[in-house]
Amino acid sequence: MTGHQRRRSIHIGGFKHVNPIPNACRIGNLVMSGVILGRDPATNAMPESLDAQCANMFAHMKATVEAAGGTTDDIIKMTVWLKDRSQRGPVNVEWLKMFPDEHSRPARHALPMDNMDGGALVQCDFTAVID
């Protein structure tokens, strides 16, 4: 099996990276995303509010794991970077919508990040294991 057949780039419509990299990559049952921002999928504009950015970011995460052949139930870890790490409320709102069962949630870690570009207030990446 060659590297090209073994490793599969995952792309979604509505959210693309500026650089020539995919939204995620899958090898076997493991999926790892690149950075996911909260841009509006229709306009590609960055909303001003953290709430809107979080809603878009979680929607992009869902679309990415589904494009890889899985569901949000396959997400095992999420890392979130916040411009203001004390502002986790909007992240938790979307988190609880996506992962309502307290006995079946991914691990999550939030980190501060001062130098986000383009008006971003939050970004994330995730790892999923798809059976």
Image (tube, helix red, strand yellow):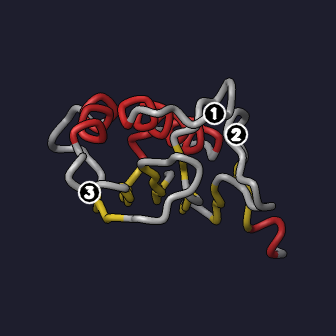
Check disc 1 and report the residue beneath it. Answer: 45
At a point 67% along the width and 24% down the height, the residue shown is 42
Closest to the observer: 45 or 6? 45
Query: How many numbered discs, if any?
Result: 3
Q: Which residue is mark 2?
A: 12
Amino acid type for the residue under numbered disc 3? Arg
**Label 1 CA crowd tier, 10 Å (few <14, some 14–19, many 20+):** few
Residue 102 lies left or right of residue 1; in this view the side is left
What secondary structure is marked by label 3? loop
Instruction: Please state, as top left, top right, bottom left or bottom right, where the N terminus lies in the image.
Output: bottom right
Give the farthest residue toward the left: 102
Q: CA distance from mark 2 to mark 3?
A: 28 Å
| Between discs 1 and 3, the one toward the N terminus | 1
Precedes in sequence: disc 2 or disc 3: 2
Q: In terms of secondary structure, where does tag 1 sit?
A: loop
Q: Position of residue 115 (x, y in %)?
A: 48, 65
Q: Earlier in the sequence, mark 1 or mark 2?
A: 2
Q: Are marks 1 and 3 in contact (CB under 8 Å)?
A: no
Circle 3 residue: 85
State the CA–CA distance, disc 1 to disc 3.
23 Å
The three-letter amino acid code for the residue at tag 1 is Ala
Tag nearer the camera, 1 or 2: 1
Image point 40% across, 37% down: which residue? 54
Question: Quick check: marks 1 and 2 in contact, CB under 8 Å?
Answer: no
84 or 131, which is in the foreground?
Answer: 84
Q: Nearer the viewer, mark 2 or mark 3?
A: 3
What secondary structure is marked by label 2? loop
Eyeballing the image, is 91 above or below 5? Answer: above
Residue at x 73% of width, y 66% of height: 7
Q: CA distance from mark 1 to mark 2?
A: 17 Å
